[in-house]
Amino acid sequence: MANNDTTNVKLGVCKVFFGGVDLGFTKGGVEVSVETETHEVQIDQYGNTPIDEYITGRTVNVSVPLAETTLDNLVAIMPGAKLETDASANATKVLVPTGVGVKLKDFAKELILVPKGLNGTLDYNDAVRIPKAATPGAMTFAYKLDEERIFNCTFKGYPVTEGTADNATEVLYQVGKATAPVSP
């Protein structure tokens, strides 16, 4: 129901926290996509006209174009990747495995998108929180003369059970009040 309050019209960017870690600047906008699959119930007597419909599944995906293409961010978004430092050579590198057989939920962490207000403050009252999200490490980036190098990655949400045994709720994602992430 509309209440004609212009303060409900919002715009702006967000900060992305994955596992309590701020992934830094983005470029091109963070996008959230929620898809719902349904099954239409049909009977012979009504032909192809559905008589009802059931939800059979829901997914949430978040596309994040990371502008801070650091080795730490690469490790954070690439399941199984390891940061290796050679102190004698003063060199650091990321080792990325093939990933065959990796169970993504084992790498899933809390993903929080927090809108950034015009005055630069973060608004946790209007956040999007995915309790368990992972990215398979499928990403693209390019080396171009006139463009920033961006790690384009997509996170997928997985359902969790939250609450007490007496009051448990299955949660895929939430929108609204979220607590500030705690760095690991």
Image: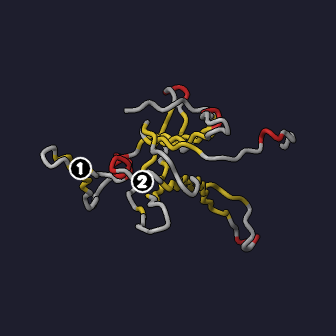
Q: Which mark is residue 2?
A: none
In the image: residue 40, left or right of residue 138: right
Q: Position of residue 59 (x, y in %)?
A: 54, 54
Q: Secondary structure at mark 2?
A: loop
| Residue 172 horizontal side relative to residue 91, left or right | right
Q: Nearer the viewer, mark 1 or mark 2?
A: 1
**Along the viewing direction, whichever of 46 and 142 lies nearer the viewer:** 142
Is residue 123 in view?
Answer: yes
Is residue 104 something one can see in this rendering? no
Q: Residue at x 44, y 51 (%)?
A: 68
Q: Residue 178: x percent and y percent?
A: 57, 32
Give the residue number, with chain letter if any, for mark 1.
92
125 displayed left or right of 142 = right
Image coordinates of residue 2 in percent, x first then y, are 85, 43
Give x and y (percent) for residue 70. 37, 50
Above or below, 18 against 63 in this view is above
